[in-house]
Image (cartoon, helix red, strand yellow):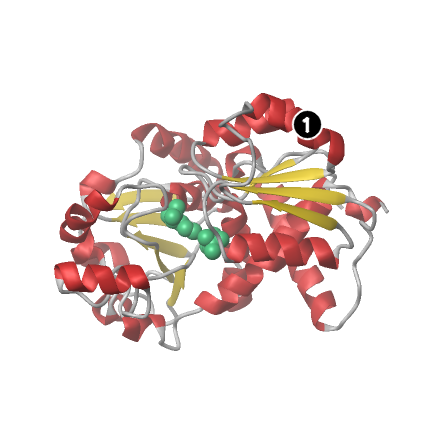
Amino acid sequence: MMDLQGRDFLKLLDFTTEEITYLVDLAADLKARKKKGIPVDRLKGRNIALIFEKTSTRTRCSFEVAAYDLGMGVTYLDPSSSQIGKKESIADTARVLAGMYDGIEYRGYGQDIVEELAEYSKVPVWNGLTNEFHPTQMLADLLTIKEKFGKVEGLKLTYMGDARYNMANSWMVTCAKMGMHFVACSNPKYFPDPALVEECQEIAKTTGATITLTSDVMEGTKDANIIYTDVWVSMGEPDEVWSERIADLSPYQVNKKAMDNAAEDCIFMHCLPAFHDLKTKIGEEISEKFGISEMEVTHEVFESEQSVVFEEAENRMHTIKVVMAATLGWEKL
Ligand code: CP
Ligand code: NVA
């Protein structure tokens, strides 16, 4: 057992390789218990608050279901129904909520906001996505990779697309911590922040990880075990950037050619939601405006045998359960 009681979960930079491994393995254990119908509701009587300043399907549902499975009550605060930031500061909100709840989830904009919330909250704060990081997604993805390959260390993960936002940042940190080989394969305009690259390179020296930035798709995808992508325009970014993003990132679409160039056992991953067909409002609008029917991933790859995106989505719930359980001291009960 590893004691994480009382800790915040804000970014994986704050956790050791051993702590991350422990959380992923405990998630596999709680997933197995759920499949067998074994209850884990040791946190009965506790309550959590979920603050969402951006929309969500997976993260919100995962926190809610996981909390119910652990026996906890949940309050959901949507982007429009609280005073946060408008009439009440983050510091005051943190102290109000910490007086009523045992844990607080925050999804929103700058990482500085969730860090401030945690500074002023006496109960654990969990990052449900910021512009800079999406750490709960990383645990779900590591669990999925471990289920597929039996390990994570030594694997090559190639991230294609917008590599300067929450998902690629999180992957660069995760690969550095876990001894994986990270490749950001994109237009150099979308390479990650050099300061974060340097920080990750320092960590990589201690774990055997490597960090590579390339704009060459064939070089970047060669022998990859995992090809990962995300939307080209993230939540909170203005609609005006679509045209530039499509022009800049189309060469970095995950398609059959990229997958065929990777290792034979390569899997395709995506945090979702994904634009791979015209069955969404935005997908339709983009198609009308720019004449494309697929964006960061082709429908063919998304629906292929190599795609593990729905297993990944399910694992969000099992891993978020562990983040709450571990930081609320579940194992000691
Ligand atoms: N992957 C993810 O965070 O999905 P949601 O935006 O639906 O929560
Ligand atoms: N980069 C995406 C991730 C969604 C899970 C966004 O921030 O919108």
Query: Few, some or many C-alpha atoms within 10 Å of disc 1 (few <14, some 14-19, many ≥20)?
Result: few
Q: Where is residue 283 in the image (x, y as percent from the top left)?
A: 27, 63
Q: Where is residue 209 in the image (x, y as percent from the top left)?
A: 42, 44
The residue sitting at 19% across, 52% down in the picture is 249
- The outermost residue toward the bottom is 305
Residues 62 and 229: in front is 62
Q: Position of residue 82 (x, y in %)?
A: 56, 36
- The answer to whether residue 9 is left or right of residue 212 is right
In the depicted structure, whether residue 176 falls above or below residue 257: above
- The outermost residue toward the right is 333
Q: Position of residue 110 (x, y in %)?
A: 43, 31
Question: Quick check: is the Cβ at mark 1 less than 8 Å away from ligand 1?
Answer: no
Residues 227 and 103: in front is 103
The residue sitting at 34% across, 70% down in the picture is 302
Q: Can residue 37 be seen in this view?
A: yes
Total labels: the figure holds 1
Q: Quadrant of residue 166?
A: top left
In the depicted structure, whether residue 93 falls above or below residue 52: above
Q: Can residue 153 be seen in this view?
A: no
The residue identified by callout 1 is 96
The residue sitting at 78% across, 47% down in the picture is 330
Q: What residue type is labelled 1?
A: Val
- The answer to whether residue 32 is left or right of residue 313 is right
SS class, disc 1: helix
- The answer to whether residue 244 is left or right of residue 140 is left
Residues 14 and 242: in front is 242
